[in-house]
């Protein structure tokens, strides 16, 4: 801080509160005409010594031309000019704006190919702008401007701290109010609700804003053309102290921020709190309603401390009384009389009309995730049956034609360890959740359920019910009805074709099938009991067949496939016109490698229910495995995506489909959509990392791996990190990550191929042989389950070649190419296998049909150094380049 030596003592770190208060009052005074500054200081400051120092400094500033708030350095040439590259990463586009403490630039992050805002402090303001920015980095909410990282950039003026932030293309709320002094009531509600959501996210992270004002709110437009409000400038934000030392969310800090939005108690020297942020939020609401701030800028501190502002209805007669009362409560001079938190304010803002629709503006349909039931006392068997009923409700909802609602399957919540609504939002992309809790009283199961808007933390619909623990048949129907009523979906559900006394056994078995691959032994007797109680229902047999397939997957014992086939026949015989049975049977047939039968099942389900997204998705995945049906697979995937709007899983599989075809551009589109919809879905980031590694985009690949590992330790992320290093001839480091992947997933034969290759290149033949041998054993075991899997067979061929069994390698690679002639990964493994067998001619004959992306990938393969200098490879590159450009 720059101050005049005479008339004001030096500020030390222990006196930062006085320093901050001095700066804020000085900035406020200098914002007034010179003739009004002394009067303002008299009204705003009750400390005689500080008051005189402020007057002295203000007078000196007037004489010196505001040297303090407009220091010499900013008058020089800009720190960064358009086109400059900072840290070999950020390309400056333009200067966007300049504030009292900092300058903001638009830049392109060339590492991620995304627009960013870079904010750097002016000289003299480093201390105020950045020390607390790291705390704000924790906030990840769509109504808060994302702060990504704090960088230090060398410049001619010395090192400069720079924040990389989300770039927001729009206008400030202050500019909007200046342009349109009175916004519509509906838009005011929307903006205030979104500001509540963003501020609540900050408060949940123990962070106060402390400088909330209309100039720190950006308004952008969503794709749907709806207003999207984003809180910016957490540069003054600071972490709150632990509740053990101060009451919740209090800050050991003093007066800061724009005087027009500062809560009255802060003028007294009280510490900022949630209530002072709420006061600022009320001031913004008042400003949107009336076009002016609650108090004139020359209002005395005494009036601010004792009175509420004039009611907005004096200026806006048609104002909604609930909205007015809510804003005036925010502006109460007594902080204890304000809302206790922003969530309570949000609830008050929602009138009966708002509560009947979605509280959060959405670009597409609502995305509902059904989460596992919570309980405090229910026995495990009853809890499992309740969860099976929730799963059943999920299936019923997904069969209903609906444009306004996408239902995320219950199994996703189980497989991704989704614990609560926030988990559902970040891991599954859910905007809404169905939460249930169950308790037991005697023979009664007590159910409490609610549809919750995740971002607003508000319940749209509630349900309470009691069911006999021996007859839960009504529970899935009730839960499905709760969801359809909450979202205005017109649906009628058919009765469940199972006797009430059999249903709890079926439901418990259904949940055990979903839970993991180890519970089949428990599920099988439950389905058998359900069949015993109702042998005419197809549901028990369909569940039993699925359990048998899981059992076979874990044991490789063919007897379980025979039993699955028998159960399938009985299920189909009992109801040949059930779409849900055909989908279940199709999944079993596909898992067993009976692709023609599986496709027939899924097509029959589509005939019965043309809008059944699961049937289209199942058909797409089945066609993908069938020779000559890749175009049909693409059409079915597209239909599944259309019917599953904004559900991430179809994009995972559609992206993988393109990845296997060697079309990396289309694969990237779908993989990126996955992480946009579900930013904490670990496999989404791991998939992108693997794709980028094969594309040679190693920085991007590493970034995605790190993101995946930040979320959860992941075998695929470790494997991909190893692959990134191996591509760059760093096999020693690659081995470390491959071994970590194998420690987490010891039965993945692909990982054994990768680590074996690195050991071989490091001239550690014993370790390489061990890895290849284990990989071959696992691949052969997988082929017993599905002998038509071309990719697995190509890996078996490669392992055999590396182990010296050339005849087996040749035999297996021919079979692999027969089963997967269009699969780019089969072509890659065939190329590597033929090169290992010294049969390069065979490899080149295959690659005439390879995609340009695959050719580029092979150019980077560590084991193809001699292969790619062959003149035939050069010719192949030229042909594929012409093909990619449309020349051939």
Image (tube, grey):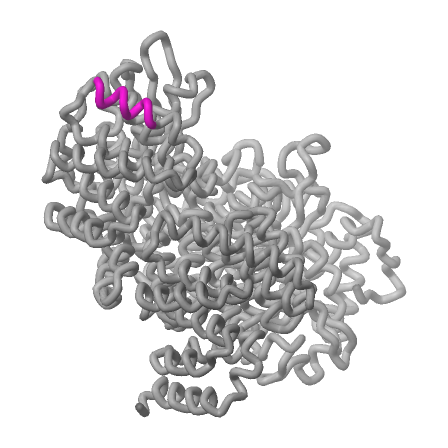
Q: Quadrant of the N terminus?
A: bottom right
Asked if 228 appears above or below 278 in the picture, the reply is below
Image position of 853 with respect to 257: above or below: below
In the image, taking residue 250 as reference, residue 833 lies left or right, namely left
Residue drawn at x 70%, y 77% is: 74
Q: Residue 319: x and y, percent?
A: 33, 46
User: Number of callouts in the render?
Assistant: 0
In this picture, residue 648 sits left or right of residue 732: left
Nearer the observer, 57 or 563: 563
- Residue 376 position, x and y percent, is 47, 19
Quarter of the rendering containing residue 70: bottom right
In the image, residue 105 lies in the stretch drawn in magenta: no
In the picture, the quarter occupied by the C terminus is: bottom left
**Residue 349 image offset from top left, x and y in percent:** 38, 41
Q: Judge whether 626 appears above or below 294 on screen.
A: below
- Where is residue 669, by image quadrant? bottom left
Main SS of residues in magenta: helix
Q: Which of 133/380 is in front?
A: 380
Closer to the camera, 57 or 493?
A: 493
Inspect this view and state whether residue 547 appears: yes
When asked about the image quadrant of residue 226, the answer is bottom left
Residue at image position (42%, 64%) is 794
Tell me where residue 396 appears, x and y as whole percent.
Answer: 22, 37
Tell me if I can see residue 222 in this picture. no
The residue closer to the viewer here, 688 or 626, is 626
526 within the magenta span: yes
- Please state the extent of the stretch shown in magenta in the rendering: 524-532
Q: Is residue 425 left or right of residue 146?
A: left
Residue at 29% of width from left, 59% of height from top?
625
Residue shown at 45% from the left, 89% from the top: 872
Find the residue positioned furthest to the top: 442
């Amino acid at each position: 801080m720059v101050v005049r030596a005479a008339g004001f003592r030096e500020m030390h770190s222990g006196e930062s509160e006085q320093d901050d208060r001095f700066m804020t009052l000085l900035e406020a005074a200098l914002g007034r005409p010179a003739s009004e500054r002394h009067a303002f200081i008299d009204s705003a400051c009750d400390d005689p010594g500080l008051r005189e120092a402020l007057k002295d400094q203000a007078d000196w500033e007037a004489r010196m031309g505001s040297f303090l708030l407009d220091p010499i350095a900013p008058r020089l040439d800009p720190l960064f000019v358009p086109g400059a590259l900072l840290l070999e990463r950020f390309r400056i586009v333009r200067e966007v704006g300049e504030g009292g403490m900092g300058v903001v630039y638009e830049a392109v992050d060339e590492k991620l190919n995304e627009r960013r805002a870079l904010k750097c402090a002016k000289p003299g303001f480093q201390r105020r702008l950045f020390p607390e920015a790291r705390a704000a980095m924790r906030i990840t909410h769509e109504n808060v401007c994302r702060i990504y990282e704090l960088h230090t950039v060398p410049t001619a003026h010395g090192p400069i701290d720079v924040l990389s932030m989300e770039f927001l293309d729009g206008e400030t709320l202050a500019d909007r109010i200046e342009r349109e002094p009175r916004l519509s009531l509906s838009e005011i509600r929307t903006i205030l609700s979104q500001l509540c959501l963003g501020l609540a996210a900050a408060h949940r992270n123990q962070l106060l804003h402390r400088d909330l004002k209309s100039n720190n709110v950006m308004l952008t437009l969503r794709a749907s053309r709806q207003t999207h409000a984003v809180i910016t400038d957490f540069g003054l934000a600071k972490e709150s102290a632990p509740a053990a030392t101060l009451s919740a969310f209090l800050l050991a800090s003093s007066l800061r921020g724009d005087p027009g939005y500062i809560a009255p108690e802060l003028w007294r020297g009280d510490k900022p709190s949630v209530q002072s942020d709420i006061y600022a939020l009320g001031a913004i609401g008042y400003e949107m309603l009336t076009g002016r701030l609650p108090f004139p800028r020359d209002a005395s501190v005494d009036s601010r401390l004792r009175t509420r502002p004039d009611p907005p209805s004096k200026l806006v007669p048609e104002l909604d009384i609930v909205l007015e009362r809510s804003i005036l409560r925010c502006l109460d001079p007594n902080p204890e009389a304000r809302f206790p938190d922003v969530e309570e304010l949000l609830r008050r803002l929602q009138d009966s009309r708002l509560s009947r629709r979605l509280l959060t503006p959405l670009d597409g349909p609502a995305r509902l995730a059904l989460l596992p039931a919570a309980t405090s006392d229910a026995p495990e068997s009853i809890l499992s049956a309740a969860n099976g009923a929730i799963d059943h409700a999920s299936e019923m909802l997904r069969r209903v034609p609906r444009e306004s609602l996408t239902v995320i399957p219950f199994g996703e919540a189980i497989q991704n360890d989704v614990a609560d609504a926030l988990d559902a939002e970040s891991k599954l992309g859910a905007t809404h959740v169905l939460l249930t809790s169950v308790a037991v009283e005697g023979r009664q199961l007590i159910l409490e359920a609610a549809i919750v808007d995740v971002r607003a933390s508000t319940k749209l619909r509630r349900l309470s019910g009691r069911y006999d623990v021996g007859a839960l048949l009504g529970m899935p129907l009730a839960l499905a009805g709760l969801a359809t009523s909450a979202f205005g979906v017109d649906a009628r559900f058919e009765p469940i074709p199972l006797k009430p006394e059999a249903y709890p056994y079926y439901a418990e078995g259904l949940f055990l099938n979903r839970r993991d691959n180890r519970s089949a032994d428990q599920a099988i007797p439950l389905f058998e009991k359900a069949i015993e109680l109702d042998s005419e229902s197809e549901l028990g047999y369909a569940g039993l067949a699925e359990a048998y397939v899981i059992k076979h997957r874990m044991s490789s014992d063919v007897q379980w496939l025979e039993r699955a086939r028998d159960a399938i026949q009985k299920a189909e015989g009992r109801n040949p016109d059930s779409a849900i049975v055909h989908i279940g049977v199709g999944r079993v047939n596909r898992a067993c490698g009976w692709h023609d039968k599986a496709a027939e099942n899924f097509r029959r389900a589509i005939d019965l229910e043309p809008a059944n997204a699961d049937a289209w998705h199942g058909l797409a995945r089945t066609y993908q495995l069938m020779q000559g049906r890749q175009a049909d697979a693409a059409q079915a995937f597209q239909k599944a995506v259309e019917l599953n709007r904004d559900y991430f899983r179809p994009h995972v599989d559609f992206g993988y489909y393109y990845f296997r075809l060697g079309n990396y551009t289309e694969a990237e589109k779908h993989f990126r959509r996955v992480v946009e919809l579900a930013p904490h879905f670990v496999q989404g980031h791991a998939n992108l990392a693997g794709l980028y590694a094969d594309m040679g985009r190693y920085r991007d690949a590493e970034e995605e791996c790190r993101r995946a590992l930040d979320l959860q330790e992941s075998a695929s992320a470790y494997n991909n990190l190893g692959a990134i290093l191996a591509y760059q001839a760093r096999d020693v480091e690659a081995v470390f990550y491959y071994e970590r992947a194998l420690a987490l997933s010891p039965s993945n034969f692909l990982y054994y191929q990768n680590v074996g290759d690195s050991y071989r290149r490091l001239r550690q033949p014993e370790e390489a042989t061990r890895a290849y041998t284990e990989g071959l054993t696992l691949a052969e075991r997988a082929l017993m389950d599905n002998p038509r899997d071309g990719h697995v067979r190509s890996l078996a061929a490669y392992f055999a070649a590396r182990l010296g069994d050339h005849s087996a390698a040749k035999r297996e690679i021919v079979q692999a190419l027969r089963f997967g002639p269009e699969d780019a990964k089969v072509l890659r493994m065939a190329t590597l296998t033929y090169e290992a067998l010294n049969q390069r001619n065979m490899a080149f004959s295959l690659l005439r049909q390879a995609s340009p992306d695959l050719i580029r990938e092979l150019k980077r393969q560590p084991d193809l150094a001699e292969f790619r200098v062959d003149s035939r490879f050069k010719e192949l590159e030229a042909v594929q380049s012409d093909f990619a450009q449309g020349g051939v």
